[in-house]
Amino acid sequence: MKKALTPENDLKKRRFQLIDNVYDQKTLEQLGKSADAAENRLRIGGHVQSRRKKRKKERTEDIEYRYVQRGSQRFDVFLDIERKIMPNGLSGIVRDYFGSEDYVIDEAHLLLAYAGAQAQPIHTDADLLFPDAMTPPFYLTLIVNVGTEPCTPDMGPTELYCCESKNFVAPCLQPNQGILFDGLLEHRGGAAVADRVPLVYQVIKRSWYHDINTSRIELKRT
Ligand SMILES: O=C(O)CCC(=O)C(=O)O
């Protein structure tokens, strides 16, 4: 039987799709706790800022919270969770999109953004593999709200290019809801006037693809 198209359920058509109930309850709670702990580390005197230069001693003693600052009030924090973070129920969608079972799910990190974070430059997470020939689907990004509140427009939700409306859309993710999108789709983190709920970022890619950019990121530790 042919599956009905809804605005959310056709990754192939729109190159993005909303996913409900991404993580099991235990994983979600663990991610929420990790996000709280990471936020506390980054927050000093009510402001979120890098403490790298200020607390030199602590930096060398505490190696748990590795992060990359992505502009003012925006941080990628790498998670110290022992087990691999597996999203639920994606295998059918991913297999269908890639046309293969041959894929891997990368490690997760948190995307933290606070009031005052400017919109990111519009970007893609991957590049065309063969600029002069058809690139097969090989890279998906998954961004999930792991907070307890819905994301709201003033928090600067992720904005994605929608080819149908020829405009950017910014889905306000509910707790444990995610947006799965092709790595070649233009998108950006929006400008935030309120502290954003914590988001988790994961990449699902064909196993033959090695992203040289991720190995170039210089990690800082709080
Ligand atoms: O923070 C966001 O909403 C999006 C982040 C993003 O696009 C990225 O890190 O590449």
Image: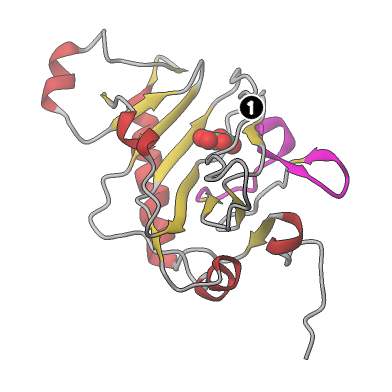
Q: Residue at x 81, y 62 (%)?
A: 7
Place residue 46 in its image quadrant: top left
Place residue 155 in its image quadrant: top right
Residue matched to label 1:
194
Front-lying residue, 209 or 199 = 209
Magenta run includes residue 52: no
Q: Residue furthest bottom?
A: 1
10 Å crowding of disc 1: few (<14), some (14-19), many (20+): some
Q: Residue at x 67, y 23 (%)?
A: 193
Front-lying residue, 32 or 72 = 72
Q: Quick check: 112 left or right of 156? A: left
Place residue 194 in its image quadrant: top right
Does 173 sit above or below residue 121? below
Amino acid identity at mark 1: Ala
Magenta run includes residue 149: yes
Label 1's element?
loop
Q: Residue furthest front?
A: 132
Q: Quick check: 66 left or right of 28? A: left
Residue range (magenta): 146-168
Quarter of the image with the N terminus is bottom right
Q: Residue at x 30, y 60 (%)?
A: 84
Q: Quick check: 7 left or right of 122? A: right
Q: Position of residue 83 (x, y in %)?
A: 26, 60
Q: Position of residue 14 (x, y in %)?
A: 75, 56
Does 219 sit above or below residue 103? above
Front-lying residue, 71 or 141 = 141
Q: Position of residue 149 (x, y in %)?
A: 60, 48
Quarter of the image with the C terminus is top left
